[in-house]
Amino acid sequence: MAREFKTVGVVGLGTMGAGIVEVFARNGVDVVAAEVDGAALDKGRANLTASTDRAVARGKLDPADRDALHARVTFAVGLDALRDVDLAVEAVPERLDLKRRLLAELDRVCPPGAVLATNTSSLSVTEIAVATERPGQVIGLHFFNPAPVMRLVEVISTVVTAPEVARDVQALCARLGKVGVSVTDRAGFIANALLFGYLNQAIGMYEAGYASREDIDAAMQQGHGLPMGPLTLLDLIGLDTAYQVLETMYQRGGHDRRHAAAPLLRQMVTAGLLGRKSGRGFYTYQAPGSSRLAPDELTPVAGAEAGDPAPRTVGVVGSGSVATDVAEVLTAAGVDVVTVAGPGAVPAADPVDRAGRDLAAVDLVVVVGPSTAPVIDVAMATGRPADVVGLHFVGGTAAQARLVEVVRTVRTSPTAVRAAHQLCAALGRTAVTCGDRAGFIADALLLPYLNDAVRMLESSYSTADDIDAAMKLGCGYPAGPFELLDTVGLDVALAVQTAIHRELPEPGLAPAPLLRNLVTAGRLGQRTGGGFRDHAG
């Protein structure tokens, strides 16, 4: 039978610590909430009060239950009040020296049988544990922000954590209504190891001028259904926090370049541009701590100038069902469409001449194809590259997709880009602009993240179910990476990742061998009935 933790101590009452206090007290656990001084304690008490009052105002918590919750919490300055707790959880800032000192003090103060837990999001639990005389009773207990809302808790065992400690803490998570995912002590654990490589890549994409901040965020939010774009999410997390997590993961994770903090991130942290907490990060906010954008930020970033007419005649260059779908959507919108097979599919002796004749009278030429094919190859074959853009419909068929990536080549004219945006507006789609690189925006950010998840599974660090649960419950993603891979198709994912790696031959971007092997074996996902999971239909 699992041990029952009747009294829990929480040290550090910032946003996360106060949230952890609320989680325990909501579920009938007596809590001792400790801070370093009276001012910090008052701030922590205010954090808890504000959170529970919001829950009452939103109908998520009954006023009587709120009052009972507060009655279970004892506030104290210093650690002496934790002398009788069954479990002590530290939630102080993400600094190894600070956490080690605190765990050593908790080891001295807490009863010999008490479990000590660290809420670190990326630091080594082992290095923290060995600062105590009871490393077998130390465990990682990583809550996600906001703790009262997010259901995931990563339970991190070290090589010396006693099995019964991990078992008892898992049972506690279930009592709290949380999903506990058990992992070992590895940089970033599951969620942060996958999340921050993606966020860091988004910063690099913006830093290189490949796409605007708004277009990067829209591509992931509207194209792949994520709850928030990567740059907006970084502002919420705090750029200083993101930098610390990436630095820790880079040092602890074998110097993987996907976790080497982008130079722009370092510069912004140095300049004090920390996101919402400072009032300015990738976006500017009305005040420090506000979630509301400053008035200047609310002006839409236009892709087309007012008064630009939508093109009436459009040439669609491509082949297969995707090109057919796009042509049908354009035709249904009243656009006169000229369809031409892509140069690689034209059985003529001179496809350039044929394409040039067929497309001579159109207002705009669009290239339709996968995000692995360079648009410039087709653009040059048309004989009028200045008038050519790529159109990549993201999130389903052309009829289903809400987002269209407008791909400009080095030869595309600004007039053609504006015309493409007007065309997308006429179709009722959101358009984003990007350069001509493998994956464009949405796939270039999504597929390396999926590939990282495959590598994590391949190393036997966790299961596909737990990795999926971590990303859905910890990050609010609509689907876990393996659910998504099975839906997209493993062969499609492999093709895009191979193209990305061909352009950027970094080890961290090489397709995972497990992904390649599954494709070779014919396990392609839902359409073949087997991928990372077996599918019945």
Image: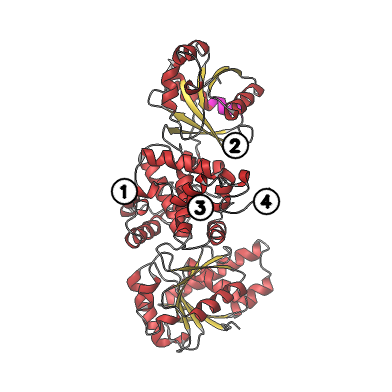
Which image quadrant is residue 5 in? bottom right
Residue 210 position within the rendered picture, expressed as x and y whole percent measured from the top left: 39, 36
> In this view of the protein, which residue sits in the foreground, 422 or 142?
142
Look at label 1 and name its amino acid.
Pro
Element class at badge 4: loop
Labels 4 & 3 near each other (Cβ < 8 A): no
Indicate which label's residue lies in the foreground, 3 or 2: 2
280 w.r.t. 176: above or below: above
Gap in Å between the C-alphas at discs 4 and 2? 30 Å
Q: Quote the CA–CA distance across marks 3 and 2.
A: 26 Å
Q: Residue at x 41, y 32 (%)?
A: 435
Q: Judging from the image, what secondary structure is the residue with disc 2 in? A: loop
- Mark nearest the camera among 4 and 3 is 4
Residue hosting label 4: 536
Percent across and percent down for residue 534 are 62, 53
Asked whether the viewer can see residue 416, the reply is yes
Q: Which residue is mark 1?
A: 263
406 left or right of 95 in image: right
Does label 3 or label 1 sit earlier along the sequence? 1
Q: Is residue 235 visible?
A: no
Viewer-side residue, 535 vs 245:
535
Q: Residue at x 64, y 21 (%)?
A: 331
Q: Which residue is mark 2?
A: 402
Q: Position of residue 193 (x, y in %)?
A: 43, 58
**First in sequence: mark 3 or mark 2?**
3
- Residue bearing mark 3: 291
Q: Is residue 189 above or below residue 84?
A: above
- Crowdedness of circle 3 by 10 Å Cα count: few (<14), some, many (20+)? some
Is there a contact, CB below 8 Å, between mark 3 and mark 1? no
Kindly report the distance in space between the C-alpha atoms of the residues bearing marks 1 and 2: 33 Å
Determine if the magenta segment contains residue 424: yes
